[in-house]
Image (tube, grey):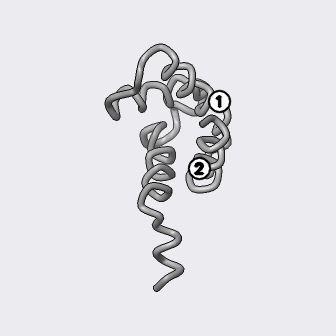
Amino acid sequence: DYHDLVRIFFKYGEDKFSKQIARKIEQAREVKPIETTTELAESIKSAKPAKELKKKGHPAKQIFQAIRIEVNDELGAADES
């Protein structure tokens, strides 16, 4: 849900636009399911202000990283080592 997305994006992606991104994803999912990474990336990109889009790297990079960390429980696995 929205609150889980915000938590994941902020905690693992350290993205200051976590709330806006989560809101855009929720809005997109109300229209139709997000089925591709391109669709997800477009939702993320549309949530960020124009000056953020000019920064180096893809605007969705941190969010995809956050999702990967959460899904793979990478920090939990590191604690077990």
Percent position of residue 2, x then y:
63, 35
Amino acid of disc 1: Gln
Which is more toward the observer, 56 or 23?
A: 23
Q: Is residue 62 left or right of residue 41?
A: right
**SS category of the residue bearing label 2:** helix
Q: Is residue 6 left or right of residue 35?
A: right
Q: Residue at x 46, y 74 (%)?
A: 77
Neighbour class for label 2 at 10 Å: few (<14), some, many (≥20)?
A: many
Give the Cα separation between the discs numbered 1 and 2: 13 Å
**Location of residue 18 by image quarter:** top right
Q: Along the polypeptide, which appears first: circle 1 or circle 2?
A: 2
Q: Which mark is residue 20?
A: 1
Percent position of residue 76, x then y:
52, 72
Q: Residue at x 52, y 18 (%)?
A: 30
Q: Which mark is residue 55?
A: none
Asked if residue 81 is positioned above or below residue 77 in the image, the reply reads below
Which is more toward the observer, 71 or 44?
A: 71
Which is more toward the observer, 31 or 42?
A: 31
Asked if residue 5 is positioned above or below residue 53 in the image, the reply reads below
Give the quadrant of the N terminus.
Answer: top right
Q: Residue furthest bottom?
A: 81
Mark 1 touching mark 2, by CB under 8 A?
no
How many numbered dots are placed on residues in this image? 2
**SS category of the residue bearing label 1:** helix
Amino acid of disc 2: Ile
Neighbour class for label 1 at 10 Å: few (<14), some, many (≥20)?
A: some
Q: Residue at x 42, y 32 (%)?
A: 41
Q: Residue at x 50, y 56 (%)?
A: 70
Residue bearing mark 2: 8
Percent position of residue 26, x then y:
56, 26
Q: Residue furthest top?
A: 31
